[in-house]
Image: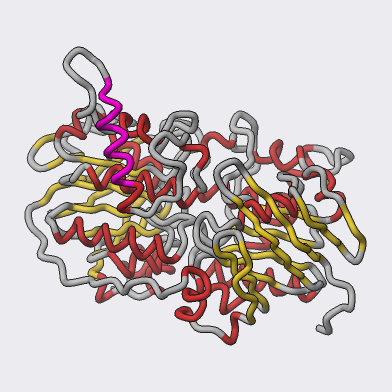
Amino acid sequence: MSVSAVARLTLAHIRKAYPAVVANDDVSLTVQPGEIHAVLGENGAGKSTLMKIIYGAVQPDAGSITFDGKAVTIKNPVDARALGIAMVFQHFSLFETISVAENVWLGLDKSLSLADVTQKITAKAAQYGLDIDPARPVHTLGVGERQRVEIVRALLTEPRLLILDEPTSVLTPQAVDKLFDTLRLLAAQGCSILYISHKLHEIRALCTACTVLRGGKVTGVCDPRQESNASLSRLMIGSEPPALVHRDALAGAAVLTVSVLSLHRADEFGIDLDGISLTVRAGEVLGIAGVSGNGQKELLYALSGEDTRAPAGSIAIGAQDVSQAAPQQRRALGLHFVPEERLGRGAVPSMSLAHNLLLTRDQAVGKAGWIDMNTLRTQAQQIIARFNVKAGGPNAPARSLSGGNLQKFIVGREMQAQPKLLIISQPTWGVDVGASAQIRGEILALRDAGCAVLVVSEELDELFEIADRLQVMAKGRISPSVPIKEASVEKIGEWMSGLWQSEAAHA
C-alpha cells in the first residue's frame, strides 16, 4: 500500500508537565494511514500520557496536533471518537455494576438498541477469537476478560486510528497470531494503529515503524523489522536487560498441596473449579498458564483465603490444612500473595506507599496499636531503591505511580517479607523489559533461597523463562504437570483450549 502524502496523525513539540515530573518533553510523532506504529519505552517514559493526549483524556501544556492534515484541538474523548480515534487503555475504563453490553453501548451511536449492540459484540468477538459474554456484569470479569471487552468496544467504532496498550497479554499464542492478522487487515484498509507493547518480538513482527521514548523525550525512530531485541532494548533503556540465570531446581518438601479441589463458583458468571490438584515444593517455581477467565481467579481466591469455602483437606500449607483458614492465618504460615489487580486489591489508591505496607504486614504496629511510620517509610524506601520504582518517595499515593512502577512496588513489598510460599499473579503485566527481567530474576532468587513459588501468568514467554514445571488451566480444570524441558509453546497453546484431555485419551 502506498503511503499517503497526508499523515493520519502528526504531533509536534508536545509537552506535558506535572508537579513532580515532566511526562512529555518536546515530543513529535507522525503516523501514516495504514501504518502500525509502535511506541516503545520503559515504565514512566511518558507513553501513556502521550496516548491520553491523543485521545483527549489529558490536555497538553504546549504543542500541536494534526489529524488527516487538519489542525485539531481534542478537548475530550468525545472529540477523539468523533475524529475516528479509539483507545484501549492499560487501566480499564469500565463501569463495574453494569453489563458488558451496556458498557459498550455507552460509547456507541445511541440510535442502536441494546439488542443491536449485543449482537454486534457477539459477531465482533467471534471474528477476532475473543470469548465474551455480553450479558455478564463487569465486576465478575477478570483482568484479561476486561481487556477483551475494551478491545471489542474499540473495534466496534470502526476507527481511523486505533490505540492499543498491551493488547495481547490475554491471548493464547494462536489467538495472538489471529489478532495480528486482523490488525494487518485493518491497516491494509487504511486504519492507522498506535501499538504499545513491552514484547519486543511482537513489535518486530507486527509494526512497520517505531518511536522510542525515554524520560519523556524521543530518543529514536526506527523500523523495528530491521532491529533486534537487543538493539530495541538499548534504544529504550540504554542497555540490554541482564540475562536470567535459571539453574535446575533442587526441589524440597511440599509447601503447598492442593488435593482434588472442586468448588462451585461464588457468582453466576464465575467458573466452577473441577478437581484441581497441584503441588509446589520448596525451591521450585510452578507456572500456571491459561487464558484469563478459565478459573484462575477462583483458584487464587481459594488459595489466598479470600474464599474460605474450600472443602476440608483440599488445601494445605506444609502439613497444616488451611482450606477454610483466613488470609492472616495463611500469612502466619509464610504465604504472601500478589493479586492481578494492582489498584483496589494490591494497593489502596489514596494511601501512601508506606501505608500500603500495612496491607500485608504488621511489624510496624506496636502492642498498643500505634503505627511506627518511621519503620514503614524506611521499608518503603528500601523497596523503591531495590526495585527502581519511579515514585515521589514513600509518602507518594499509590495512584500517582504508573502501572508498571506500582507493580514493581507491590511485588517488592511481598518479596521483601521473605515468604516461604509466594503466589503471584501476572508478575510483569505492563512492566517494561528491564523491570520484567528484574522481577523474574528476583523470583528465581527467591526460589534458589528455598521459597516455593506459584506463578499464574498469561505470558507464555515469561513462564518458559522462570518455571520449572507447567500446568494449564482451562474451563475450571487443570492439566497434568509437565517439566519445562518437555514443554513447547505449541503444546501449551493447545492445552490452553483444554486439549490435554483428548491428547490423554489418544495416548
- Among the 4 quarters of the image, the one containing residue 290: bottom left
- Looking at the picture, tell me which residue is in the foreground, 189 or 507: 189
- Looking at the picture, tell me which residue is in the foreground, 123 or 447: 447
- Among the 4 quarters of the image, the one containing residue 196: bottom right
Above or below: residue 33 compared with residue 337: below
Q: Is residue 359 left or right of residue 209?
A: left
- Looking at the picture, tell me which residue is in the foreground, 380 or 310: 380
- Among the 4 quarters of the image, the one containing residue 72: bottom right
Q: Position of residue 460 (x, y in %)?
A: 40, 66
| Residue found 63% across the figure and 68% down from its top | 218
Instruction: Return the residue found at the far top.
Output: 368
| Residue found 19% across the figure and 46% down from its top | 421
- Looking at the picture, tell me which residue is in the foreground, 442 or 375: 375
Q: Position of residue 100 (x, y in %)?
A: 65, 40
Instruction: Please say whether residue 317 is visible from this viewpoint.
Output: yes
| Residue found 67% across the figure and 79% down from its top | 208
Instruction: Return the residue found at the far bottom.
Output: 226
Residue 267 belongs to magenta span:
no
Q: Position of residue 444 (x, y in %)?
A: 23, 62
In the rendered image, the quadrant that contains the N terminus is: bottom right
Q: Is residue 363 left or right of residue 341?
A: left
Q: Is residue 459 left or right of residue 263?
A: right
Q: Is residue 469 left or right of residue 352?
A: left
Instruction: Please say whether residue 325 is visible from this viewpoint.
Output: no
Q: How is the image coloured?
A: secondary structure
Above or below: residue 340 compared with residue 83: above
| Residue found 34% across the figure and 44% down from its top | 338
Q: Which residues are magenta?
A: 371-383
In the rendered image, the quadrant that contains the C terminus is: bottom left
Q: Position of residue 19 (x, y in %)?
A: 59, 41
Does the magenta stretch mainly form a helix, a strand or a loop?
helix
